[in-house]
Amino acid sequence: MRELYIKRINPDLDCLRDIAVDVHLILSDVYDTPPWTFEQTFSDLLKVDTIYFLAYHEEKAIGFLSAVEVMDEIEITNVAVIQDFRGQGISSDLLSRLLKFDGTFFLEVRKSNEVAKNLYKKHNFQAFHERKNYYKNPTEDAILMRLERL
């Protein structure tokens, strides 16, 4: 049994600089080149409309989900779990926490990322559009997906 704890970040109670360090370490493990700098991550955490959930294993941050909420729409901006903890359902656990909110959820995913697309389909997201050459390094199309929970 894994010792997993998922926490929603509270900007009024949590040390956001420490959270930004944890998120950036996760991004550095997951990506060859992290999509966000430490400064961008810290700045994102300071915004009123952002939602972050972090997954911890024995007090170490091992995954996170970030989203932006604007009125009744929530855009998922990243779901990431470090290499050593993949395949254990942590991304699904993080996503389940966010999906307790009401609204319309949006995200984009690399066309080739079958693991992520299957995760989102498992949670009833539907593909509705394709953006050509959206991603860089390497260049790839994005699949836009949505889920309405009103």
Image (tube, grey):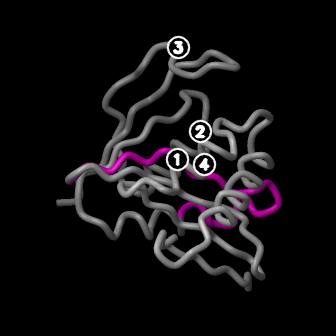
Residue 75 is a magenta residue: yes
Q: CA distance from mark 1 to mark 3?
A: 21 Å
Work out whether 132 lies above or below 64.
Answer: above
Q: Earlier in the sequence, mark 4 or mark 1?
A: 4
Q: Which residue is mark 1?
A: 118
Q: CA distance from mark 3 to mark 2?
A: 17 Å
List x then y, in percent, for residue 87. 70, 60
List x then y, in percent, for residue 148. 23, 52
Q: Earlier in the sequence, mark 1 or mark 3?
A: 1
Residue 44 is a magenta residue: no
Q: Residue at x 32, y 49 (%)?
A: 105
**What's under tag 4, amino acid-wise?**
Thr
Residue 114: give its label: 2
Q: CA distance from mark 2 to mark 1?
A: 6 Å
Label 4: few (<14), some or many (≥20) within 10 Å?
some
Q: Quadrant of residue 92?
A: bottom right
